[in-house]
């Protein structure tokens, strides 16, 4: 049984980490979050120590390490801008890290983490769960079987409506979240790289607080993408039925269904990590470079193919 610590225990994604730790037969010994709304711990690990101050968490974990009870893994579900510091903490504490996406906000932070991995003997693992989704694996296999000079036409649309709270939280500050393309889009951009190869072109058509869109060209695909937090971007018929989220990926006009199974993919990720097959720092590089470029790119409204949602009224 491995011993886990969790940083960011009150966050949206933290329960999936708790569930994955439990379902893989391991123990969460300590958790930390500046927010104390962590009653979910009782459903998984009621005996876990909990701290609202990082210094107290650090002191406790250091004491445990000195007593031979240190954490084998530190799971990181903290705000995006803290991921780098928390991965460094894990490695310097003698633990491996399991970090939520985005791994870091800036590509320049990847190589120093690789240096720290080498110095500490630890490893950074990341949650890139779409790489484990059966529908995405099947798509990648299909692409691999086709002629190498074939390029697919892809439309990626993701609308996940959020209330007024979103822009007032850390997620609404680009310097903390990386902006919408980073916060809700990075795993989709990683998936596109995973399936369709190296990125060749990256054009921004729309960049705002609540929505972004652009054009990406990969070795094997031309992609029109659109991301939004605005419920008005959910197609009218679905919104009329009360739906507040819309997720669609079409390949050559054919819909790829991958909505099911999302809640189980963290457990699958943990199984692979514990078996020594986790996705590491280098696997994240292209996606981090992609969203970093989107964050700073000028809007070029007429360059590349535009997603049809961009011009909706």
Image: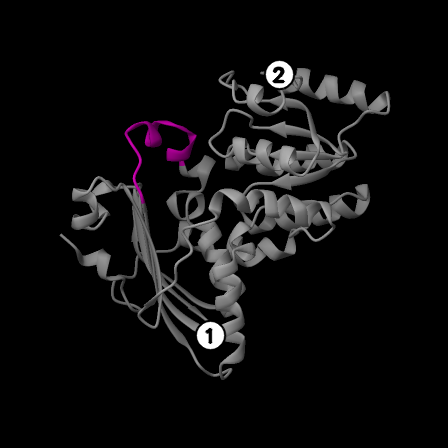
Residue at (45% x, 54% y) in the render: 188
Q: Residues within 10 Å of mark 1 (few under 14, many from 20)?
A: many
- Quadrant of the image occupied by residue 72: top right
Residue drawn at point x = 39 percent, y = 28 percent: 169
From this viewpoint, is residue 109 visible? no
Q: Secondary structure at mark 2?
A: strand
Furthest-left residue in this view: 313
Q: Position of residue 116 (x, y in %)?
A: 74, 43
Name the residue rendered at 41%, 39% in the picture.
174
User: How far apart, in angstroms, are the residues tagged by discs 1 and 2?
Assistant: 47 Å
Instruction: Identify the residue shown where x is 54% and y is 71%.
Output: 141
Q: Quadrant of the N terminus?
A: top right
Against 204, residue 209 (above or below) is: above
As displayed, is residue 194 above or below residue 63?
below
**Which residue occupies the foreground of this view, 209 or 164?**
164
User: Would you say the residues marked 1 and 2 are in contact, meaning their CB atoms lie under 8 Å apart?
Assistant: no
Give the residues in magenta.
Answer: 160-173
Q: Residue 220, which numbered label?
A: 1
Q: Residues within 10 Å of mark 2 (few under 14, many from 20)?
A: many
Which mark, residue 51? 2
* Residue 313 visible within the image: yes
Q: Position of residue 127 (x, y in %)?
A: 58, 46
Q: Is residue 22 left or right of residue 200?
A: right
């Amino acid at each position: 049984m491995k011993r886990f610590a969790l940083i960011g225990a009150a966050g949206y994604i933290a329960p999936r980490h708790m569930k994955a730790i439990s379902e893989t037969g391991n123990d969460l010994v300590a958790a930390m979050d500046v927010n104390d709304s962590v009653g979910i711990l009782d459903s998984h690990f009621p005996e876990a120590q909990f701290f609202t101050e990082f210094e107290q968490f650090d002191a406790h974990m250091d004491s445990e390490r000195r007593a031979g009870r240190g954490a084998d893994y530190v799971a990181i579900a903290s705000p995006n801008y803290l991921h780098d510091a928390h991965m460094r903490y894990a490695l310097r504490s003698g633990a491996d890290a399991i970090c939520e996406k985005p791994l870091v906000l800036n590509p320049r932070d990847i190589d120093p983490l690789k240096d720290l991995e080498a110095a500490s003997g630890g490893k950074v693992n990341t949650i890139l769960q779409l790489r484990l989704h059966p529908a995405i694996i099947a798509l990648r296999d299909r692409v691999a079987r086709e002629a190498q000079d074939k390029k697919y036409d892809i439309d990626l649309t993701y609308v996940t409506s959020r209330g007024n709270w979103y822009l007032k939280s850390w997620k609404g500050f680009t310097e903390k979240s990386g902006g919408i393309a980073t916060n809700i889009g990075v795993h989709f951009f990683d998936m596109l790289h995973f399936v369709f190869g190296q990125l060749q072109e990256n054009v921004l058509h729309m960049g705002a607080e609540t929505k972004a869109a652009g054009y990406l060209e990969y070795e094997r695909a031309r992609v029109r993408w659109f991301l939004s937090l605005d419920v008005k971007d959910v197609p009218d018929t679905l919104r009329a039925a009360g739906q507040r989220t819309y997720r669609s990926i079409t390949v050559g006009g054919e819909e790829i269904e991958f909505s099911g199974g999302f809640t189980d993919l963290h457990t699958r990720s943990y199984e692979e990590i514990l078996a020594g097959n986790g996705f590491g720092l280098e696997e994240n590089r292209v996606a981090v470079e992609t969203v970093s470029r989107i964050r700073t790119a000028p809007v070029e409204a007429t360059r590349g193919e535009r997603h049809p949602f961009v011009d909706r009224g």
